Image (spheres, rainbow, N blue to C red):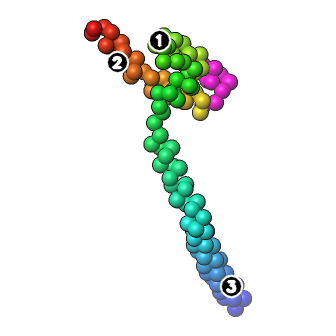
Amino acid sequence: MAAKILANLIVMGSGILARAFVQAYRQALANASKSGVAQETIQNTVRRASKIMTEQEARQILGVSEQSTWEEIAKKYDNLFENNAKNGSFYLQSKVHKAKECLEPLYQCKDQGTTAG
């Protein structure tokens, strides 16, 4: 008899907890949509994923000007990349790498243009 009462209490308690959890989750979603947090989070995720580094940003990261040669850029890249590998952060190291990747096609085009002309 006591086991049956205990089992009923456990089943009823589980049902109450499940309903409370679902209700709390629905309320959290409603609050997020009212305050715009959900939409803002989605927009930020899309912006970060699709953000392409500009030439100006790449030059700022590497500390080079438009007049810099590829050799100067490569030296700056090697120096910054190695420094961040030793005592820096992976985030900064990846920014330096992306900056080099952004500028590389520009200098390849210049090199091809000077050899062909």
**From mark 2 to mark 1, how far is it between C-alphas?**
13 Å
How crowded is the residue under tag 3: few (<14 C-alpha within 10 Å), some, or many (20+)? Answer: few
Q: Quadrant of the C terminus?
A: top left
Is 51 in front, or is 114?
114
Q: Which residue is at 64% across, 81% downward? A: 16
> Mark 3 vs mark 1: which is more N-terminal?
3
Look at the numbered discs 3 and 1 and tell me whether their residues touch, using CB distance below 8 Å: no
**From mark 2 to mark 3, how far is it between C-alphas?**
76 Å
Task: Say which amino acid is labelled 1.
Answer: Thr
How crowded is the residue under tag 1: few (<14 C-alpha within 10 Å), some, or many (20+)? Answer: few
Q: Position of residue 46 (x, y in %)?
A: 47, 49
Q: Position of residue 55 (x, y in %)?
A: 47, 27
Q: Secondary structure at mark 1?
A: loop
Look at the numbered discs 2 and 1 and tell me whether their residues touch, using CB distance below 8 Å: no
Look at the numbered discs 2 and 3 and tell me whether their residues touch, using CB distance below 8 Å: no
Task: Say which amino acid is labelled 2.
Answer: Cys
Q: Nearer the viewer, mark 2 or mark 3?
A: 2
> Mark 2 vs mark 3: which is more N-terminal?
3
The residue labelled by disc 3 is 9
Span colored in magenta: 82-90
Determine the image quadrant of residue 92: top right
The residue labelled by disc 1 is 69
**Which numbered tag is attached to residue 109?**
2
Q: Is residue 33 above or below residue 71?
A: below
Is 77 in front, or is 36?
36
Q: Position of residue 68 (x, y in %)?
A: 50, 13
Q: Is residue 21 at all visible to an observer of this figure?
A: no
Q: How many marks?
A: 3
Secondary structure mostly seen in the magenta stretch: helix
